[in-house]
Image: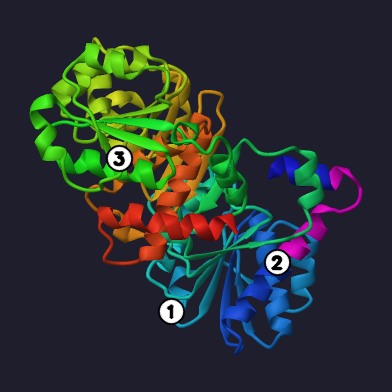
Amino acid sequence: MRAIESDAMNSGQTSGAELMERAGAAVAGQIRLRWPKPGRVTVLAGPGNNGGDGFVVARHLARAGWAVRVMCDAPRPSAALTAWQAVGSVQPFDPDALRPDDLHVDAIFGTGLTRAPEGMAARMIEALAGFPGIVAIDAPSGLCLDSGRIIGSGAARAALTVAFDSPKPGHVLADGPRLCGRLVVADIGLAPWRKAQGHSDTSIMDARTTTGMGDWLRKTTAGDAHKYGHGSALVIAGDAAGAARLTAKGALRAGAGLVTICPERRDMQGHAGPPDALMRKPLDGPDDLAALLDGRVTALGLGPGAGMERAANLLPAALGARITTILDADALTALAGDDAPAPHDRCILTPHLGEFARLFPDLAKRLKDAPETGPAFSKLDATRQAAARIGAVVLLKGPDTVIAEPSGRAVIHSAPDLPWLATAGAGDTLAGIVTGLAARGLAPFDAACLGVMLHGAAARHFGPGLIADDLADALPHVIRTWET
């Protein structure tokens, strides 16, 4: 954003003061939409551009009939400050003078937080905690917008956060969704300069976004009408039937033309249940797996319900075939072993944070350590570094799922409002959806991204009360909606 704003100002077609005016006017407009009846507002302005935005907000609200009070310690001279002083005055920060019933505009710190707030600013942020009516400009002060992590002792929880031009990673990672409240992204006229910068290598999506999904789905419906033309997926099963069957059903519903579930011969009877569309073949050891990977199988799912010993035993043969391979659950634990083979570049790893910590303990530790300075180490940083280190796509699950490939290209999928997705077996179904999409011919990164989107959209469609079995059954509705 700094580069985009710099380009815009260097073009001579806009200025910092003009961008600040647009930003402040946008925040004031959002406040008036949410609180249409003028009341009392206290604007807390910091020393930088965020504080300048706050002065603009104060002026616009005063003109709209609000009773406005502005607090700021040692404000820097600026056009925004001068314009406000023609309307009202500036008081020094005073935590004891805050009124819980006021609306508070947090314009203390915005983007680019590099150190923990100190002194009076820290006291003001602490005093805000628990107040119901807080509007944050850019971000709640104390929140790192590179990571979504809190730098310092805390940050107040906003009812509304107004960001400019584009959402930032910190809005959707870690504590960002909880602290930002409702996030509104305001247009302040920077689109031409953003396009001039080229596409970012990070995308942020939420579970309601369908932009571009129709194109991805059309890729999965093109091709030969024969079942093998729609891809053949193999799912390795162990003696626990449930997890592997959830994976296999997810692969079927995602559109794989043929899905075969492969337990050991002695466990075949335990895998005789529905869905009847599943093929079943016994697979006892690595030689059997090598024989099944006969050139027609286009994706392999290994891990859910396989069992640790079985996953470790089959892992070398699975990776030796060099087809797109989704490694989840027990396969990830096996992969963390000292003698495990290295994944190839067509692998997709789908760990939750616990499994990630077994594979990349140093990165997981950095995510746990409290940050002292910014930008803080983020889940985005951790996933990118993991993908580069292991040479495969890494899909790090959570309400803020991050997908990264070794080149550094990454997607953040934010779904903090789907708590019912935290249910046993949901990850197994996700592994299956990704396996099915990969079987259809999508590149590993694209299959992972689309799989996460479909998974979240299916959960949203079903709603509270969801169990993992429902996810695959909801996919036809979601796919039908997106294709149109």
Name the secondary structure under disc 3: helix
User: For the point 51% across and 28% down, which residue is it?
Assistant: 405
Q: Give the SS element for disc 1.
A: loop
Q: Is residue 143 visible?
A: no
Q: Is residue 218 visible?
A: yes
Check the picture and name the quadrant holding the C terminus. bottom right
Q: Is residue 284 above or below residue 147?
A: above
Q: To which residue does mark 3 refer?
A: 248
Could you tell me which residue is drawn at 75 percent across and 60 percent down? 188
Judge from the rendering whether residue 279 lies leftward or rightward of residue 373; answer left or right.
left
* N-term mark: 2 or 1: 2
Does the residue at mark 1 contact the one at mark 3 (Cβ under 8 Å)?
A: no
Task: Name the residue that disc number 2 marks.
Answer: 24
Residue 171 location (% of width, % of height): 51, 53
**Disc ID at residue 100:** 1
What amino acid type should be assigned to the residue bearing mark 3?
A: Ala
Q: Which residues are magenta?
A: 9-23
Query: Residues under labels 2 and 1: Cα distance?
Result: 23 Å
Which badge, 2 or 3, is on the more N-terminal residue? 2
Give the residue at the far left of this rendering.
Answer: 266
Dots 2 and 3: beta carbons under 8 Å? Answer: no
Secondary structure, magenta segment, majority class: helix
Residue 464 sits inside the magenta stretch:
no
Instruction: Judge by depth and name the residue closer to the eye, 103 or 183.
Output: 183
- Expressed as whole percent of the image width and height from the top left, the position of residue 391 reads 45, 19
> Between tags 2 and 3, which lies in front?
3
- The nearer-to-camera label among 1 and 3 is 3
